[in-house]
Image (cartoon, coloured by chain):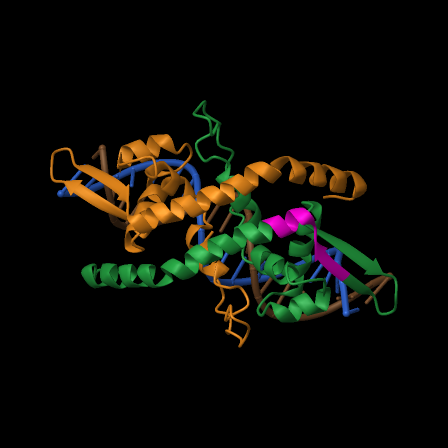
Chain colours: A orange, B green, C blue, D brown
Amino acid sequence: MSVAHTQVTPQAGGPCGDDDCGIREVLDRIGDKWTVLVVMELSKGVRRFRELHRAIPGISQRMLTLTTRRLCRDGLAERTAYPTIPPQVEYHLTPMGRSLAEAVRQLADWSREHKDGMQEARARWDAEHPDEG
Amino acid sequence: MSVAHTQVTPQAGGPCGDDDCGIREVLDRIGDKWTVLVVMELSKGVRRFRELHRAIPGISQRMLTLTTRRLCRDGLAERTAYPTIPPQVEYHLTPMGRSLAEAVRQLADWSREHKDGMQEARARWDAEHPDEG
DNA sequence: CTGAATCCTATTTGATACTG
DNA sequence: CAGTATCAAATAGGATTCAG
């Protein structure tokens, strides 16, 4: 996603300021289809463009380009281009990018812990709501 | 988002199993435009449909309906309908939903901590790349 | 009040071909 | 190899209207 967020008029609120405590901020950054996958791959170490492409099955060249560039723009990754022929480009996470990877990893933990629970809940729901379609 | 995830052929891998450690699982659930906002609001307590609608500026009736239903289906929230006239419906998080809220809150923490850093990075990038458009 | 149904648009992504 | 450009497909979300 980034699911372009219609600008929400911030409301006066509690200590969180606005209602969402800034959650949308992150999700508008990492909620898309590929960003976290690239971040997680880069969290393993320096990677070349091609290495990323092969490590992340299904991503198109175009989306990898867009995703890496956005990471660089946001200061989450850095790009090193060696002016060789053929060109060689390496990406690596910045400290901020690594801290994001850590935060994401925790969310992944939640996912693994509750994967089954959600699966069962869905099965129950679908059984009780045969009128799906 | 949910940014329908093209089914990625799982590759044999490390202890994480597949490459993304299940991160996409969560993001396909909460990466959309409204889910986390509803979850965060419900984490404050029981809410009626209308209360949610007013607490989350910008959400349409349609999306609130879809979002709450999906939360219920996934076992993250529960719905209580009182057969009064006019109808009254209450939503509340399940324990699993509350644990998700907690995980999300941590990601929000990251966001607040690095909001400025990313802002600056973007400003730098945009200054160094005048060829935007 | 809660929510279903329909229509419609904006955004995101994928496919493909091309370039230094 | 890394990246760009263009086009087409898919999808999510918004607006509106109707119903119990």
The x, y position of residue B24, in whole percent, is 50, 41
Q: Quadrant of residue B128?
A: bottom left
The x, y position of residue A1, in whole percent, is 47, 51
- For image coordinates 54% across by 57% down, the residue present is B33
Viewer-nearest residue: A19 or A60: A19
Q: Which residue lies furthest to the left in this view?
A: A84
Residue B33 relative to residue A44: left or right: right
Can residue B133 be seen here? The reply is no
- For image coordinates 56% across by 40% down, the residue present is A111
Residue B56 relative to residue D2: left or right: right
Q: In the rendered structure, does residue B95 fall within the stretch colored magenta?
A: yes
Viewer-nearest residue: B43 or A122: B43
Viewer-nearest residue: D9 or D10: D10
Residue B84 relative to residue B108: left or right: right
- For image coordinates 17% across by 42% down, the residue present is A81
Image quadrant holding the C terminus of chain A, namely top right
In the image, the segment drawn in magenta is B90-99
Can residue A89 be seen here? The reply is yes
The x, y position of residue B58, in whole percent, is 57, 68
